[in-house]
Amino acid sequence: MFWNKKPASKTDEKNEENGAEAQKMGMLQRLAMKKVMSMDPKEREKLMQKALTPENIEKNKDKILATMEQMKASGQLTDEQIKMAKEKLGL
């Protein structure tokens, strides 16, 4: 019954947020996200290093910056976080 419901934990809230984000993604993006999240951490790190090569970053610089600005406008990132990301990516 509804009165036997346990209070939501932080992990439940996080899963709900991830579920809401997943709803905004397309089918292929959701499949890719599931695959990446189920990977071994070392394998995931290797994949990210391969994807974030300087050539790829330079080629998609405009898209990366546009996404950062969109995330800032929606409140997902702060100015400080954007600054740190730009420094790490060399933008």
Image: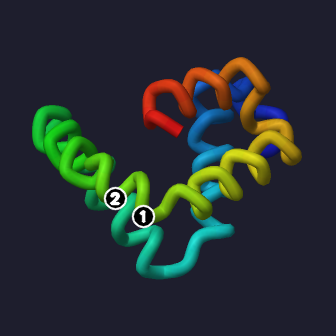
Q: Are marks 1 and 2 in contact (CB under 8 Å)?
A: yes
- Above or below, 84 against 22 in this view is above
As rendered, which of 31 and 83 lies closer to the eye? Answer: 83
The CA span between labels 1 and 2 is: 5 Å
**Residue at (70%, 57%) from the top-left corner?**
66
As rendered, which of 55 and 49 lies closer to the eye? Answer: 55
Residue 17 in view? yes
Residue 39 in view? no
The answer to which quarter of the image holds residue 17 is top right
Disc 2 residue type (three-letter): Asn
Residue 34 bears which disc, if any?
none
- Left or right, 4 with respect to 15, comes to right
- Above or below, 51 against 73 in this view is below
Residue 59 bears which disc, if any?
1
Query: Badge 1: how crowded within 10 Å, few (<14), some, or many (20+)?
Result: few
- Above or below, 41 against 80 in this view is below
The answer to which quarter of the image holds residue 28 is bottom left
Please provide percent x and percent y for residue 75.
Answer: 84, 37
Residue 56 bears which disc, if any?
2
**Residue at (12%, 34%) from the top-left corner?**
42
Query: Badge 2: how crowded within 10 Å, few (<14), some, or many (20+)?
Result: few
Disc 1 residue type (three-letter): Lys
| Secondary structure category for the residue under label 2 | helix
| Secondary structure category for the residue under label 1 | helix
Please provide percent x and percent y for residue 68.
Answer: 68, 46
- Above or below, 36 against 4 in this view is below
